[in-house]
Image (cartoon, coloured by chain):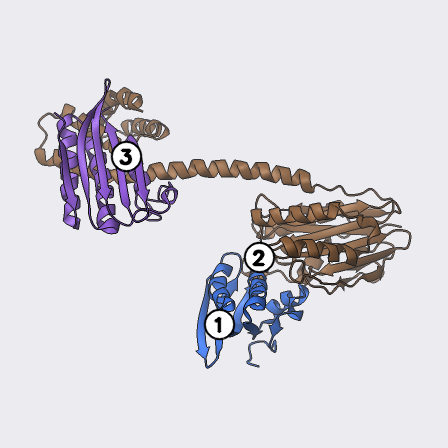
Amino acid sequence: MEETIRKNTVKYQKLLQKYIETQDEKSLYDLELISKAFIKKNILPEELINLHIQAMERIYPQLLEEYKLSMEFLLEATVFYGLALQEVDYLRQEKDVLTSEISVAANMQKTLLGTQRPEVSGLDIGAISVPAHQMNGDYHHFTKGSNGTIGIAIADVVGKGIPAALCMSMIKYAMDSYPEATMSPNKVLENLNRVVERNIDPSMFITMCYAHYLPAESKLRLSSAGHEPGYIFRAETEEFEEVRAKGIVLGVMPDATYREYELAIQKDDLIIFLTDGVSECRDGDRFIETEELLEVIRKYIDLPAQELVENVYQYFEKLQDFQLRDDFTLIVLRKEV
Amino acid sequence: MNPRSCVNIHKEWDIVGARQLGREMAKEIGFGTVDQARIATAVSELARNIYLYAKNGQVCFEYIYTNSQKGILMTAVDTGPGIKDISRVMQDGYTTSGGLGAGLPGVKRLMDEFDIESAAGEGTKIKAIKWIR
Amino acid sequence: MNLSVNVQEDSNVKVLEVSGEIDAYTAPELKETLMPLMRESGNEIEVDLENVQYMDSTGLGVFVSALKASKESGSHYTLKNVQDRVFRIFEITGLSEIIEIKAAIRGGNE
């Protein structure tokens, strides 16, 4: 820092003198380069003013005493600005540390909560889950039982960001301990609810939908813990059918029970699961109504499942100026045979 | 040889007195204009804390010398309520925005060395040194 | 958008008039007013949501904490004048089954 000031003292003096004599733009441009170098070296405003005072005294040894005093006055005034600048710099460093920690955590979360879309002949599966910030408070997971049953879990925790993401890890670990493929969906939720209720902050809860798709019987069995309703696009009528399943959110009632619903699925029907990041999209001050969501899905209905969900996501991402307000998860399953 | 000069802080006007003494002593021993301004600002913060929170206290200055450098040591002592959570008042980044605390991180920044001792109910003692560059 | 919470004392019922949007940014304000009342014993509280057009899950979280607190303190709260859009999320989440909500008529008093 001292070094930079010393190196630039003469340069500054020359530029200043030249400018006073000719008022040329070139000296101002060179001055800009000096000030950039100073900022880079964290040279504070009071140092710069001091440099100016010294340069002026050397160029004009006969300076008015009043002028000199006024410059000292100005120097005093900038000491606090210097402090403010240092604090901003410190906060920026702190922020960088946090950001990189969070990005490490986000990567860990991706690995931890990672799930693969199962390959099932006759079933086309598409899934997308995008966090609003770095970490995801939505959870989705697929399993494939030995009898061919496909397990689908989709969950959303209150809020978003880090607290929500931490909470989600709990669901993941609890789920790992169940033989979920052989447990009925309502039992899965009842077990999870007990874990969540004991371990969650009183102001938090989780909504979740758990479903089994049974390819042999062409049936969908599902239970919902207060989760956003899903939809089935019926190929025969080309209409959407709301899948509304009743049940209280996880984490509120210690001994909640859940109902199991069963739906018949026909060829080319499309099953849709989502989180409220999808249904609560907002375009400026306007809320996206469910109808609009379904129209967007309809628009891409002929695409393969994965392309369909990606296109729907892109549509809403664009609508919200590429700033998701909430974590966004959309899963679709199409029965192809 | 090593005189110690103090200013008692009871009223707001005393902050000005402390600044003045600090600046004069800094100038005397050879600090440049910029450092004089920084030392005066640090004195202000310490004296203001005494005036605002402790009501009663003292700011003292003395020169210190080592083999290789010389500088000024300021000590601010009060018998006020003390600071319960020092790490909280030392939390950096918010003093100039009028946020938390009493500007102590700023003082730490303006000076070269900084030390604080405080106990709830027993008052606070802050020592800060600035070396001549 | 801002949220305002006014407390009206009406004989032995305290009425919280909430207006604005309840989301992650504004929910703490509601929480700060509602929770102390819920933790005191024997309070009867009505939360008037007539002027709340939007609420997200963070808002629901406040009412869930309030419900949990009420079980310990013996205080009690009800919601009234809940708008359709807001009522919908109480319904989906199943919370309308355990939180007392008075006549959910748009705009009107019961």
Drawn side of residue A164 relative to residue B94, left or right: right
Chain A's colour is brown
| Residue underneath mark 2 | A283
User: Which residue is at 10% across, 25% downward?
Assistant: A61
Q: Quadrant of residue A227?
A: bottom right
Separation of disc 3 and disc 1 at Cα?
49 Å
| Residue underneath mark 1 | C16
- Pointer 3 and pointer 2 on the same chain: no
Q: What number of labels is visible?
A: 3
- Depth check: give the residue in front, A144 or A233: A144
- Is A72 drawn above or below residue B82 in the view shown? above
The amino acid type of the residue labelled 2 equals: Asp
Q: Is residue A322 visible?
A: no
Chain B's colour is purple
- Depth check: give the residue in front, B84 or C62: B84
Q: Residue A160: image x %, image y %?
A: 58, 51
| Residue underneath mark 3 | B110
Per the image, label 3 sits on a secondary structure element best described as helix
Chain containing the residue with disc 1: C
Chain C's colour is blue
